[in-house]
């Protein structure tokens, strides 16, 4: 069973691994002169993992200093984990589709860490990590806010520079508006399902310590004492 202190250090280690992987992925991309490498921070995966690393540092410090996570931290973790896990699922789908279409795609070790290893570990940590409260179902609609805003901005920006981080946002690479809208709707559904799964797991496997044991009962007056009349 993980102790709270051990879990706090594991959060800090996870943040360090994420930062190293992000740095390697950026340096690896800089070796290419494509627009993709020049727009490194335009990817939802990179943005969400950057937020994940920052939150993991904060969560690690809190775990080392307190016995329980505050409610706001559980909410923040549910939001960020929903984004990173869904981004990992989307990346796996893109890699699979590229293989089906015979499109060569190189996956460096940093992509494997960011899209598969870290999401898998965070799900395990979400379930067994001590001191986590149950997440609120109100998290689910807020999870959708970021990808919607990101998607609208990315489509607008892509029209200006002629580049999109994901093919399904580019009307030149899909059959039309209907296919793009359908793909985006499916993506948002996956975000909502992942968020709902995290909330459900947090409620089934709530790890916050139970109520404190009852203190000593107040002393009872002796049988010989008399009250005022």
Image (cartoon, helix red, strand yellow):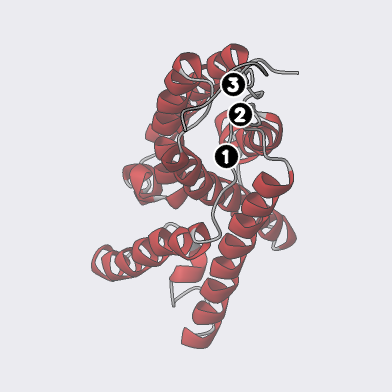
Look at the image and tell me whether residue 103 can be seen: no
Check disc 2 and report the residue beneath it. Answer: 109
Within-10-Å neighbours for mark 1: few <14, some 14–19, many 20+: many
Q: In front of the other: label 3 or label 2? A: 3
How many numbered circles are shown?
Answer: 3
Using the rendered image of the protein, determine whether residue 109 is visible from the camera's viewpoint.
yes
197 over 119 or under it: above or below: below
Which residue is label 3 attached to? 218
Q: In this orientation, which residue lies closer to the viewer: 57 or 156?
A: 57
Distance from label 3 to label 2 (Cα)?
63 Å
- Estimate the x, y position of residue 212 in percent, counting from the top left: 62, 25
Q: Which of marks 2 and 3 precedes in the sequence?
A: 2
- Compared to residue 180, the image places residue 30 above or below, namely above
Q: Upstream in the sequence, badge 1 or badge 3?
A: 1
Q: Is residue 46 left or right of residue 203?
A: left
Q: CA distance from mark 1 to mark 2?
A: 33 Å
In the rendered image, the quadrant that contains the N terminus is: top right
Q: Residue at x 52, y 72 (%)?
A: 184
Task: Give the CA separation, mark 1 to mark 3.
Answer: 32 Å
Residue wearing tag 1: 133
């Amino acid at each position: 069973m993980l102790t709270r202190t051990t879990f706090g250090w594991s959060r800090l280690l996870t943040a360090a691994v994420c930062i190293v992987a992000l740095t390697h992925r950026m340096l690896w991309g800089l070796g290419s002169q494509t627009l993709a490498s020049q727009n490194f921070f335009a990817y939802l995966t990179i943005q969400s993992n950057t937020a994940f690393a920052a939150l993991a540092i904060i969560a690690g410090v809190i775990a080392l200093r307190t016995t329980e996570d505050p409610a706001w931290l559980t909410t923040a973790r549910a939001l960020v984990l929903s984004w990173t896990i869904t981004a990992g699922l989307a990346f796996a789908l893109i890699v699979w589709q590229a293989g089906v279409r015979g499109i060569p795609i190189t996956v460096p070790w940093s992509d494997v860490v960011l899209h598969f290893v870290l999401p898998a570990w965070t799900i395990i940590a979400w379930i067994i990590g001590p001191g986590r409260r149950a997440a609120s179902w109100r998290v689910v609609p807020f999870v959708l806010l970021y990808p919607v805003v990101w998607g609208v901005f990315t489509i607008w920006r892509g029209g200006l520079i002629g580049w999109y981080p994901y093919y399904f946002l580019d009307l030149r690479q899909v059959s039309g508006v209907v296919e793009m809208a359908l793909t985006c709707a499916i993506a948002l559904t996956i975000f909502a399902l992942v968020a709902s799964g995290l909330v459900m797991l947090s409620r089934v496997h709530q790890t916050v310590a139970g109520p404190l044991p009852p203190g000593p009962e107040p002393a009872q007056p002796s049988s010989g004492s008399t009250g005022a009349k």
